[in-house]
Amino acid sequence: MHFTGAVFGTPLRVTANMLTPEPIIQDWSELASLRYDPQNPWVQRALTLARQLVARSGGRYAVAPGLIEGPSDVCAALRGITRLAGDLYEYPAEVARLAAKGAEAWRSYAEALFSLIPLYDGGTVTQWNLWAPGRAAALQEDFCTVISPQQYRQFFLPLDRELARSVDLLWVHVHAGAIHLVDELLTIEEIRGIQIVHDGIASPPLQRVLPVMRRVQERGKCLIVRKYSPEELESILPYLSPRRLAIDTYCATPAEAQHWLERVAQWPFAQAH
């Protein structure tokens, strides 16, 4: 997220505990002069790193295109999360214009990266280390966690559909706290998968999340279940199909991981692949 603001020229604040971008749109009158500059030093350094990684790998391993966040997160980086939430009501036209500039920046930067990074076994290793065929990407819209489905539909859904059309395959990263947006995402035919990430104590109870996970699969989308512990997955997997399912969990030791793999092999659906 810090990089996302920096490519538009936001200064970065460094403290002992965090690195954050300083919003640069203090007044909406400044929007007209805001531009994504492909010659921005952060952009050029990132592209240089991509070239270096490709040359160093020599095709032996994948180089992941580290894309900037989606249009809503671009807006949040440039305006600030709290002010942007109010702007949806007070300055909707300005938010829409800024979001469109964010989407155009995403497309421009993605095109530059994909021109440098070769396919790996016919596909792309996207964010979160997930391979997908073709020129693939993962999209993050974390700001949308705090808005309603109607606001997402109005401001950001059309732009996310455009971004999905600009690549061969796109899947979306969604926090469990934002599962109220999943049904909106399911209306976008071009989005091929949805990752639902456990948010700890901020996550809704499983009885609310499980029906949403099932709807993702029922609509023919890939489902990526992330950060749920092996113990929690014991309550989740009986309700899911193995088709179009990826599990991204964690174990404390290699022995625990091996035990979990053996346990997964015992699920009835494991034979349905």
Image (cartoon, grey):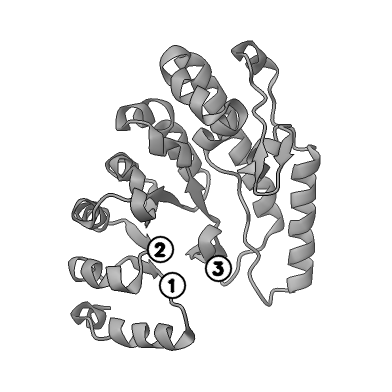
Residue 170, which numbered label?
none
**Relative to 206, residue 80 above or below:** above
Q: Residue at x 69, y 74 (%)?
A: 59
Count of labels shown?
A: 3
Looking at the picture, does residue 4 appear above or below residue 228? above
| Residue named by callout 3 | 122
| Label 2 SS | loop
- Judging depth in this view, the residue of 166 and 150 nearest the camera is 150
The residue lying furthest to the front in this view is 16
Query: Could one spot residue 194 in this view of the protein?
Result: no
In which image quadrant can residue 80 be found?
top right
Q: Quadrant of the N terminus?
A: top right
Between residue 180 and residue 170, name the one nearer to us. Answer: 180
Give residue 227's mark. 2
Residue under the point 78% across and 71% down? 56
The quadrant of the picture occupied by the C terminus is bottom left
* Residue type, numbered disc 3: Gly
Q: CA distance from mark 1 to mark 3?
A: 28 Å
Amino acid bearing label 2: Lys
Label whose residue precedes the other's in the sequence (1 or 3): 3
For the residues marked 1 and 2, what is the alpha-carbon distance in whole angstroms? 7 Å
Q: Position of residue 73 (x, y in %)?
A: 53, 37
Find out whether the residues at labels 2 and 3 contact each other: C-beta distance under 8 Å. Answer: no
Place of residue 136 in the rendered image (x, y in percent of width and height, measured from the top left): 52, 56
Q: Earlier in the sequence, mark 2 or mark 3?
A: 3
Q: Judge depth for marks 1 and 3 and give the one in front.
A: 1
Instruction: Give the distance between the C-alpha atoms of the residues marked 2 and 3, in whole angstroms.
Output: 28 Å
Residue on which disc 1 sits: 250
Rendering quarter of residue 101: top right
Q: Are marks 1 and 2 in contact (CB under 8 Å)?
A: yes
Place of residue 31 in the rendered image (x, y in percent of width and height, measured from the top left)? 63, 17
